[in-house]
Image (cartoon, rainbow, N blue to C red):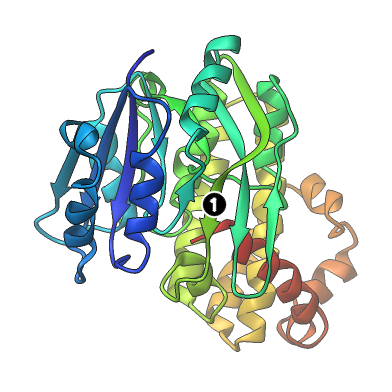
C-alpha cells in the first residue's frame, strides 16, 4: 500500500490532542507519515503528544513534529504541513477532532477501487447544543460534488477527505496565508475542479468537535466582524477562480457568494455595524442581476427593502441568524 501523510495543525489543544493522536496512531492502515505542525502553541499540547507517542513505539519513526518560530495562523500551518508531506495522498485532521481507527484503510481501499483523486467520508458533529451525523451521498461525479460545495447548506471542509497530493503541486493550490477564516475556500473548490475522479463513503469515519471555546465554529457564532470579513474575502476567492471557467460553475459560485453575503448582511445589521453592512450591501447589488433574481432579489422594491439596514435588522436578522447558526456551528472552526 502507498504512503499516506496525515497532516495535523496544533495550537491550544491540550485537552484534545491525546484523543486525536491515539485515534491516528491506532489506524489499521500501516504505511503512514504523521506530520504535526506546532504553531507556537502556548499550552502543553506538544508535551502531551510526545508522551502519547511513547505508547506506540512502532509509529515513532513515522512521526514528525515541525515547529514554527512564530505564530502564523491555520492557513500557513496547513501549508507547512503540505510542503513537508511525502505521501502519495494526504489527509487533514484538526487536532481537536478524531477518526475511527479504520478510517484511513477504508478511504485507501475506496481510492484504489475507483482510482479516485479525492475520497470524502461522513462525519459526526459534536457541539454544545446537539450532536448529529453528516453522511455523504455516494457519488463518483465530480460535477455533483463541486456543485454541492458551492451550496451554503453543504460542507466544504478539508477534513474528512483523502486527497491526492499532486493536485496541490501540479496546480499550485495552497492556502492563502493570513486568511485564517474560511481558508478551505481557497483550496477545496480548486482541488475538486482539477480532480479527475472522486468518490464518497456513506459512513461516519470522522468526528468533528465544536465544543472548544476557541474553535472557529464558536468564534463565528459571536459578533466577530474581523472574522466575517476574512470569510467574505475567502468566498470572493471562489468567485474569482471560477470567473473564467465554465459558465455553470461561475454562476453557481456567484449564487453561493450572494447567499453568504446576505447572511452576513443580516448579521451585521443585527449587531449594529452599519459600516460593514454598507460594504456587504455594495457587494451584493454589484453582482449579476440574474443571480439576484434566482435568490429572490429580482424586484427593485424588494432589493431596496432587503438591502435596507433597519429592514434586515428587525425583519430578517432572526431568520438569517438561526439558519447561519446551525450551518456555522456544524461546519466551521
Please name whichever residue, 126 or 115, is drawn nearer the observer in this view of the structure: 126
Please name whichever residue, 295 or 145, is drawn nearer the observer in this view of the structure: 145
x, y percentage for residue 218?
A: 51, 73
Where on the picture, by quarter, is residue 170?
top left
Number of marks in the rendered image: 1
The vertical placement of 168 against 16, above or below, is: above
In the image, what residue occupies the spot 75% across and 33% down?
A: 137
Residue 56 appears left or right of 247: left
Q: Secondary structure at mark 1?
A: strand
The vertical placement of 145 against 80, above or below, is: above
Extreme residue in the left direction:
69
Instruction: Name the quadrant of the N terminus.
Output: top left
Residue 177 in view here: no
x, y percentage for residue 296?
A: 87, 58
In the image, what residue occupies the spot 65% across and 22% down?
A: 142
In the image, what residue occupies the spot 56% across and 85% down?
A: 273
Residue 237 appears left or right of 14: right
The vertical placement of 195 against 317, above or below, is: above
The vertical placement of 273 against 158, above or below, is: below
- Residue at the disc numbered 1: 207
Residue 11 in view here: yes
x, y percentage for residue 330?
A: 62, 61
x, y percentage for residue 264?
A: 63, 69
In the image, what residue occupies the spot 22% across and 32% down?
A: 58
Please name whichever residue, 332 or 177, is drawn nearer the observer in this view of the structure: 332
Tell me if mark 1 has few (under 14), some (14-19) or many (20+) residues whose alpha carbon lies within 10 angstroms of its own: many
Where on the picture, by quarter, is residue 331?
bottom right
Where on the picture, by quarter, is residue 72?
bottom left
Amino acid at each position: 500500500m502507498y504512503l499516506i501523510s496525515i497532516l495535523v495543525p496544533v495550537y491550544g489543544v491540550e485537552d484534545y490532542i491525546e484523543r486525536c493522536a491515539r485515534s491516528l496512531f491506532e489506524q489499521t492502515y500501516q504505511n503512514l507519515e504523521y506530520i504535526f505542525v506546532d504553531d507556537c502553541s502556548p499550552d502543553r499540547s506538544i508535551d502531551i503528544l510526545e508522551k502519547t507517542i511513547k505508547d506506540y513505539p512502532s509509529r515513532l519513526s513515522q512521526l514528525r513534529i515541525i515547529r514554527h518560530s512564530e505564530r502564523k495562523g491555520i492557513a500557513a500551518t496547513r501549508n507547512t504541513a503540505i510542503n513537508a508531506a511525502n505521501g502519495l495522498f494526504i489527509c487533514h485532521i484538526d487536532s481537536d477532532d478524531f477518526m475511527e481507527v479504520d478510517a484511513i484503510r477504508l478511504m485507501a481501499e475506496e481510492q484504489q477501487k475507483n482510482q479516485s483523486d479525492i475520497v470524502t467520508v461522513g462525519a459526526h458533529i459534536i457541539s454544545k447544543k446537539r450532536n448529529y451525523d453528516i453522511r455523504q451521498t455516494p457519488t463518483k461525479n465530480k460535477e455533483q460534488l463541486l456543485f454541492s460545495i458551492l451550496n451554503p447548506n453543504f460542507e466544504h471542509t478539508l477534513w474528512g477527505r483523502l486527497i491526492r497530493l499532486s493536485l496541490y503541486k501540479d496546480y499550485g493550490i495552497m492556502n492563502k496565508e493570513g486568511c485564517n477564516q474560511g481558508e478551505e475556500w481557497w483550496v477545496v473548490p480548486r482541488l475538486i475542479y482539477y480532480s479527475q475522479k472522486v468518490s464518497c463513503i456513506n459512513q461516519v469515519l470522522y468526528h468533528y468537535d465544536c465544543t472548544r471555546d476557541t474553535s472557529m465554529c464558536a468564534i463565528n457564532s459571536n459578533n466577530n466582524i474581523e472574522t466575517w470579513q476574512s470569510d467574505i474575502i475567502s468566498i470572493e476567492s471562489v468567485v474569482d477562480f471560477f470567473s473564467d471557467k465554465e459558465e455553470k460553475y461561475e454562476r453557481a459560485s456567484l449564487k453561493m457568494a450572494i447567499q453568504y453575503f446576505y447572511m452576513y448582511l443580516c448579521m451585521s445589521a443585527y449587531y449594529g455595524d452599519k459600516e460593514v453592512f454598507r460594504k456587504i450591501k455594495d457587494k451584493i447589488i454589484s453582482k449579476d442581476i440574474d443571480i439576484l433574481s434566482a435568490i429572490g432579489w429580482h424586484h427593485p422594491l424588494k432589493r431596496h427593502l432587503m438591502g435596507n439596514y433597519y429592514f434586515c435588522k428587525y425583519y430578517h436578522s432572526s431568520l438569517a441568524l438561526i439558519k447561519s447558526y446551525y450551518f456555522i456551528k456544524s461546519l466551521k472552526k
